[in-house]
Amino acid sequence: MSFNVSRETEQRLQLYEALIRRWNPRINLVAPSTLPDLRQRHIEDCLQIARHVTPDDGLWVDLGSGGGLPGLILAIAFADRPTRFLMVESDQRKAAFLRSAIRELDLPRSSVLSSRIEAADPLKAAYISARALAPLARLMPYLGKHLADDGQAWLMKGERWQTELDEARQAWRFALESHDSITQPGAAILKISEVSHV
């Protein structure tokens, strides 16, 4: 299963894959056991978001970017859009990887904020993404703080997403659209908007 992308996007994705393989022995960007299937497990997985949204200009914030999943993948997929991408990553070594990758991938509208998410000033993001970061109930305060009033969050969640949803709804109100994951049975991509505290 792979998504059709332009030749330029494909070249960047291949370079990104090479960068992960080069850095991963020194910094654990992805689980070493997933490296043989890096394209499917990580890159194609993250590209799914690009099937559901086409950003306008404005700021796209990727929370807890780690090795750039999904933030850098989306910045590559939307490199021809006016959208600015900000990767929020508190781990200094991972932030260094992200900055190096942004340079090598030639993504001038992307940057890195090396900060804890809760310590950052409100970012008023038009879009927020996160993958394998925290349970939904722990993510909601971040969305409440950093999402613009008319913004939307795109969260990649595993098989327990329904349970996480029930827990999050105890303290938060939000609009929800769910999309089944194509790469991981039982997983989902959640679009969350209109976030407010109960």
Image (spheres, grey):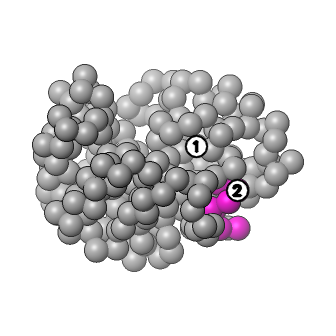
**Foreground residue among 106 and 8:** 106
Residue 8 lies in the magenta stretch = no
Which residues are the magenta region?
Answer: 143-149
Q: What is the x, y in percent for residue 19?
A: 16, 48
Residue 62 makes an appearance in the image:
no
- Dot 2 crowding, Cα within 10 Å, few <14, some 14–19, many 20+: some
Residue 92: x percent and y percent? 35, 52
Going from N to C along the chain, the mark reached first, 1 or 2, is 2
Q: Nearer the viewer, residue 17 or 11?
A: 17
What residue sits right under mark 1 in the picture?
190
User: Mark 1: which amino acid?
Assistant: Leu
Give the residue at x 75% y 50%. 174
Q: Is residue 9 left or right of residue 77?
A: left
Question: Quadrant of the image for the N terminus?
Answer: top left
Q: Residue furthest right?
A: 198
Q: Name the residue located 81 percent from the left edge and 41 percent from the top edge.
A: 171
Whole-number angstrom distance, CA of label 1 to CA of label 2 = 16 Å
In the rendered structure, find residue 144 and report the number of the disc placed on it: 2
Q: Is residue 104 above or below residue 44?
A: below
Q: Is residue 53 left or right of residue 97?
A: right
